[in-house]
């Protein structure tokens, strides 16, 4: 591995724990809500940097991220059999998210909202999340993969919104 991917993982975790994202929940957030937001961040990351020249490094990042998720699930206390099932479910969910956001830039706001409504069932005000991820996606597109792996991220997307 050429890069230390734990820094990228921690950056995605930092983005995922941004309080702005959870201010309009229908009920107390749970692990599944945070994991879903994490997977959406990661899906946008992969979507933005997908290219033939990045193929190998993105595969390494993908493998590393899902290994870290598996370790996190183990820390929560799931047994070996349930971890395999959970990981399969999470990987399938992740690929569904990637499919949903593949043509994100070509979707109007309502279609983006529809994509998120079906995923984010515990969240109110999906419009704010659409705006947040629009901004996140735009910010990703302004950087190269290499600069992103080495840079510091601040989780301030959407911080001006109330």
Image (cartoon, rainbow, N blue to C red):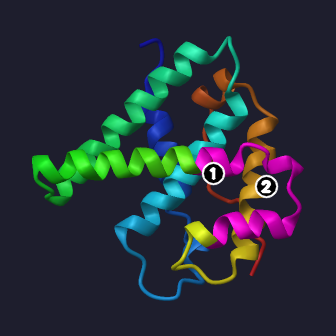
Residue 154: image x %, image y %? 63, 51
Q: Is residue 158 visible?
A: no
Front residue of 54 and 118: 118
Single out the mark in the foreground, 2 or 1: 2
Question: Is 110 placed left or right of 156 in the picture?
Answer: right
Residue 150: image x %, image y %? 59, 27
Looking at the picture, does residue 132 appear above or below residue 160? above
Principal secondary structure, stretch drawn in magenta = helix
Q: Which stretch is magenta?
A: 97-117
Q: Quadrant of residue 146?
A: top right
Cα separation, mark 2 vs mark 1, equals 13 Å
Q: Is residue 120 visible?
A: yes
Residue identified by numbered label 2: 135
Q: Which mark is residue 154?
A: 1
Q: Residue at x 41, y 36 (%)?
A: 65
Question: Is 72 placed left or right of 77 in the picture?
Answer: right
Q: Quadrant of residue 71?
A: top left
Q: Check residue 120 for magenta coloring.
A: no
Front residue of 147 and 73: 73
Q: Residue at x 54, y 77 (%)?
A: 121
Q: Secondary structure at mark 2?
A: helix
Q: Earlier in the sequence, mark 2 or mark 1?
A: 2
Residue 43: image x %, image y %? 60, 44
């Amino acid at each position: 591995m050429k890069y230390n991917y734990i820094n990228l993982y921690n950056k995605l975790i930092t983005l995922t724990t941004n309080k702005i994202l959870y201010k309009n929940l229908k009920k107390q957030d749970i692990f599944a809500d945070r994991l879903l937001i994490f997977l959406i961040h990661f899906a946008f990351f992969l979507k933005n940097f997908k290219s033939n020249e990045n193929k190998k490094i993105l595969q390494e990042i993908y493998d590393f991220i899902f290994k870290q998720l598996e370790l996190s699930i183990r820390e929560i206390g799931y047994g070996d059999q349930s971890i395999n099932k959970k990981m399969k479910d999470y990987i399938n969910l992740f690929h569904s998210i990637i499919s949903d956001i593949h043509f994100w830039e070509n979707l109007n706001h309502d279609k983006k909202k529809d994509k998120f409504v079906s995923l984010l069932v515990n969240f109110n005000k999906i419009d704010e999340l659409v705006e947040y991820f629009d901004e996140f996606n735009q910010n990703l597109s302004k950087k190269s993969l290499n600069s992103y792996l080495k840079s510091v991220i601040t989780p301030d997307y959407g911080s001006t919104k109330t």
